[in-house]
Image (cartoon, rainbow, N blue to C red):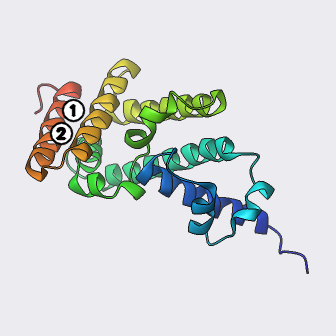
Amino acid sequence: MPYPEGHKIKVRGKIIESAAQAFRKNGIRDISVPFIMKGAGLTHGGFYAHFNNKEQLVAEACRYAISDTIALLQEAADQEKQGPKIYAVIDYYLSKYHRDKTEMGCILPTLTGEISRSSEEVRQVFTRELERMIDFISDLAEVDKSKGSALLSTLVGTLVLARSVNDSTLSDSLLTAGKQQAKALIMPNMV
């Protein structure tokens, strides 16, 4: 019996979502195709019906994860009623929740170190998605791309450091300092 219309697209989406979650939490190198397929509720034998190789999946997972992060950040911005919307994004991005929920958070802090050793295909997709994230941050903050790049770099770098240390007090203080510096970067007179 044939599968219903749209079945293959739905299954592919489940695989990409499983991969994005796994890559966000553990990076690329330590995650196998069977692990991703199991996370999607599928056997690993069906992987090649949807992707040519793991690199193609990494590229698709990067696209998905950045879109997901932008949607989350836009939601945080939309909830801000009084102050600058970018402040709500900074507060969300550098929150304890975002720090601790790596599997649901931004993929940039997790993958940035590995991408330089990835295929050209993955690096191209990552570059485009990074540019999309910079554009989103720049537009929301109402700053030029240079300042938007600096702001995103501050956010990602702060989150990397806050996730890396095993001292919760230090981690929390890194998040607090990062928020202050990020806000000062875009509106130095308002902090």
Q: Position of residue 36 (x, y in %)?
A: 58, 60
Q: Which residue is mark 2?
A: 179
Q: Position of residue 169 (x, y in %)?
A: 8, 50
Residue 133, can we see it? no
Residues 79 and 33: in front is 33
Residue 169 appears left or right of 83: left
Label 1: which secondary element: helix
Could you tell me which residue is drawn at 16 percent across and 28 percent down? 184
Residue 4 appears left or right of 124: right
Amino acid type at mark 2: Lys
- Distance between the alpha carbons at the discs numbered 1 and 2: 5 Å
Q: Position of residue 138 (x, y in %)?
A: 38, 29
Residues 2 and 162: in front is 162
Q: Where, by quadrant of the figure, is residue 10 drawn?
A: bottom right
Could you tell me which residue is drawn at 27 percent across and 41 percent down? 159
Residues 72 and 139: in front is 72
Would you call the spot at circle 1 few (<14 residues within 10 Å), some (14-19), or many (20 or more)?
Answer: many
User: Is residue 145 shown above or below 112?
Assistant: above
Could you tell me which residue is drawn at 35 percent across and 26 percent down? 148
Amino acid type at mark 1: Ala
Residue 182 is marked as 1
Q: Are marks 1 and 2 in contact (CB under 8 Å)?
A: yes
Label 2: which secondary element: helix
What is the quadrant of the C terminus in the image? top left
Residues 155 and 86: in front is 155
Q: Position of residue 49 (x, y in %)?
A: 80, 57
